[in-house]
Image (cartoon, grey):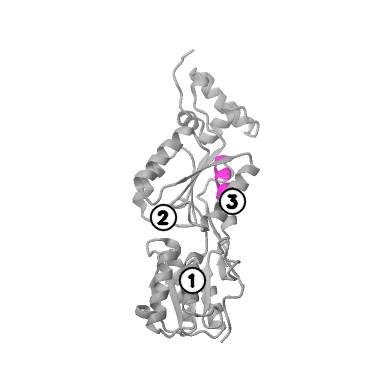
Amino acid sequence: MNDKKITLNYIAKKANVSVATVSRVLNGNSSVDEKIQSRVKKIINSDGYNVKKTVKIKQIISVIIPDITNPFFVNIIEGIENTANLYGYHIILSQFKENKDILNKYFKDIRNIGVSGYIIIPSIGNSEYFNDILKRANAPIVFLDRKVNIENINYVGSDNEIGAYNATKYLIDLGHKNILYMAGPKDISTETERFNGFMKALHDNNMDFDYNQYYKIANFNFDESYEQMKDIIKSKLDYTAIFSACDVMCFGIKKATEEFGISIPNDISLIGYDNIPFSSIIGLTTVSSQAYEMGKNAVLSILNITNERITDNVNIILQPNIVIRNSCKKI
């Protein structure tokens, strides 16, 4: 017998199956089709390798996010963890703080563990962050919520454009004509799509938009939206409603309005996006991007890929809905 060390990639390629399938065969998982089990075992036996030296893939899903303090990710992570646990998987949660070096180190360390798949929420759409990782991955990767400008990837997200369109149309139907837009970072796909939806709703209703006056950037940040809102109030700008591209910025907006004695919704209407935890506490009308369902579908996508139930790239786009509370008023 030959005692040469074998790799999972070698067996998978020769048997024309996935690395995860080979791992399940080696671990004695009975869910693998008998013909596939026989083919994999035949390759191992005929080549005379020592199976005990083979690294096993654990039932672990690596979840890599930009910032663990972002409250929007709470519902996503809950959807991921609950679904993973339901199928006997565990998750490893890491944050890379929008730092490429940290991202690469996490990936290298986690890759050595032998995980079943990766769920990555990118910070920006720049392909340089992720091209190298895609080449080195030994398990499927699903990008979640935010898009990256790379072809033929697995993606699960929400239709941000239609969500923003419907939110803006809701304000228009309430009689609002001067609507201020509070924006996030321009290099994140969710922001771009939401602003496109906002503008499309205005265009479809024959409404103009003064970009220089009514477009304000607060980068999905509480403090920045608070400072922006104070400046807006002091400028005496004529507006009756604000569409904020995320709920976090709504909290900053609300803090500023309270300090200046401005009432929401009696003086101005406010609508947010994401339906994060605690938005209900301030009665915020917002758009739910189906965060829990996104996390759930990301896990199911990895399981479908590793179990070879699907062969094409995953592209799941969930439909958002407006959660109506009491921060908007008809005028």
Give the residues drawn in magenta, as a range: 296-307
Q: Is residue 93 magenta?
A: no
Task: Name the mark on residue 123.
Answer: 2
Q: Residue at x 53, y 35 (%)?
A: 20
Labels 1, 2: front one: 1
- Nearest to N terminus: mark 1 or mark 2: 2
Please determine whether, in this image, residue 187 is positioned above or below residue 226: above
Q: Position of residue 176 (x, y in %)?
A: 51, 84
Q: Amino acid at mark 3?
A: Glu
Which circle's residue, 2 or 3, is located before the other in the chain? 3
- Count of marks placed on residues: 3
Residue at 50%, 18% in the rendered image: 50
Query: Which numbered disc, 1 or 3, marks the residue that appears first in the sequence?
Result: 3
Amino acid type, residue under disc 2 in the picture? Ser
Disc number placed over residue 255 in the picture, else none: 1
Residues tagged 2 and 3 counted as in contact (Cβ below 8 A) = no
